Amino acid sequence: MAGAFDFKKEYRNLYSPPAAPGVVDVPEMLFIMVDGKGNPNTSEDYQSAVEMLYGLSYAVKMSKMRGAQPPGYFDYVVPPLEGLWWLSDGSLAWYEDKDKYCWTSMMRQPEFVDTAVFEAAKTELSKKKPHLDLSRARLEKLTEGLCVQAMHIGPYNDEPRTNAAIVQFMADNGYVSDISGTRRHHEIYLSDPRKTAPEKLKTVLRHPAASCGG
């Protein structure tokens, strides 16, 4: 019997890039998203968003156990937590003042998830965790397109090292950063920081890019 579908293994180019930066064309994907502001290390808003995303994602996965299996359902491994990040002052001065962070936390969903499946998951989670404001969550498609990405291994606070390598790769290979109001710095968290030593954390860092040639 085939095992559960694992997005990380099936799409290694998106979830397992090498440490050396490289170009990737990111296709359209479906996410549950929650927006917020503030330092992720201290913000209750951020912790609530993460709790919400995991709760909704597992409610979708376990819908088959409630006699409400959606059409097209298949068994799968819940994908990792991801985040889009920018600064409230519009600058690119990353890591200088995390209180200025704006973010969209998100988790990828299988293609069979539609509005009905999403709303059913919200109803189910509201019974277990009524303290969560599920009106903050939305189901949305995202197409990132041309990006440069790399695997960062180490503490989150050491990410500037990998970001600098990404920027240098762009400069050396005819690309420019295309971070804007609609294209954001993207991180994919492959490790559980509660169980992984900081020096072993794995995080995909992805920057929107554009060719200097247009």
Image (spheres, rainbow, N blue to C red):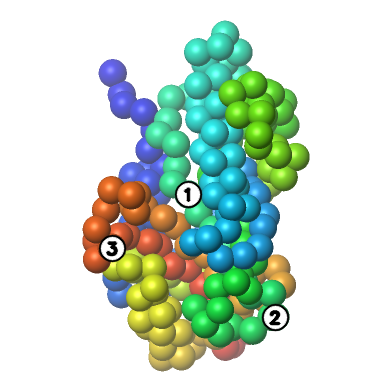
Q: Position of residue 5 (x, y in %)?
A: 39, 33
Tag 1 secondary structure: strand
Looking at the image, which residue is at 41% across and 55% down? 189
Q: Earlier in the sequence, mark 1 or mark 2?
A: 1
Residue 126 appears in view = yes
> Position of 144 compared to 25: left or right?
right
The residue beneath circle 2 is 89
Q: Earlier in the sequence, mark 3 or mark 2?
A: 2
Q: Residue 3: image x %, image y %?
A: 31, 26
* Residue located beneath label 3 in the image: 198
Residue 89 higher or lower than 202, as above or below: below
Q: Amino acid at mark 2?
A: Asp
Quarter holding residue 214: bottom right
Residue 81's disc number: 1
Point out the tag, 3 or 1, that comes first from the N-terminus.
1
Specify few, some or many for label 1: CA neighbours under 10 Å numbering under 14, 14-19, or 20 or more: some
**Residue 107: horizontal and vertical position, in percent?**
54, 46
| Within-10-Å neighbours for mark 3: few <14, some 14–19, many 20+ | some
